[in-house]
Amino acid sequence: MPIKQIKKFFSGPAPRLTREEAMKVFQRDHFKCRYCGLDGLHRFENWLILTVDHVHPHARGGSRSMENLVTACQPCNLLKGKRTYASFEEAKTHVLAKREEWQRVFHEQVKSSGTPAAG
């Protein structure tokens, strides 16, 4: 078992951000996903899916500094995953490309099902 896994086994998972820390990130980013622009202040349902993302993943050694934390909606956070990027802009480009790819898949699936797509 690699040393990193052993260390994680004994220390447990990294502590979560506090609500206050998350709110500082959300306020700085005006409650908008930094990847796709989803506005968490526009609708309650949008606000519910906002998360804090580590640009350089915490699982890969990324810090919990404000410079490494951004507001992200759950879909964008999931699409970015634990990959590492040279910059936030590179991560954003990847996430937006994946969103477009999944949108094409969605429309193809809906079209093949014979059901009209909403939105």
Image (cartoon, grey):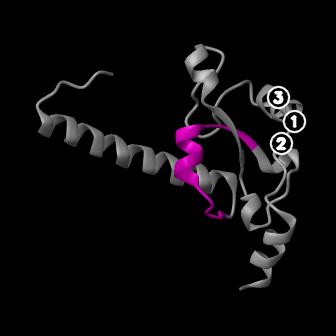
Q: Quadrant of the C terminus?
A: top left
- Please name the amino acid that badge 3 sits on: Met
- Please name the amino acid that badge 2 sits on: Leu
For the residue pair 70 and 50, the one nearer the viewer reads as 50
Q: Are marks 2 and 1 in contact (CB under 8 Å)?
A: yes
Identity of the residue drawn at 71% across and 25% down: 31
Identity of the residue drawn at 13% across and 39% down: 112
Does the stretch in magenta take in 75? yes
Name which of mark 3 and mark 2 comes first in the sequence.
Answer: 2
Tell me the residue that label 2 is attached to: 17
Tell me the residue that label 3 is attached to: 23
Tell me the residue that label 1 is attached to: 21
Does the stretch in magenta take in 39? no
Residue range in magenta is: 70-85
The residues tagged by marks 2 and 1 sit, at their Cα atoms, a distance apart of 6 Å
Identity of the residue drawn at 75% across and 76% down: 5
The residues tagged by marks 1 and 3 sit, at their Cα atoms, a distance apart of 5 Å
For the residue pair 100 and 24, the one nearer the viewer reads as 24
Q: Residues within 10 Å of mark 1 (few under 14, many from 20)?
A: some
Q: Are marks 1 and 3 in contact (CB under 8 Å)?
A: yes
Q: Quadrant of residue 81?
A: bottom right
**Residue 90 spot, x, y in % from top left:** 61, 56
Identity of the residue drawn at 29% across and 21% down: 118
**Residue 108 spot, x, y in % from top left:** 20, 42
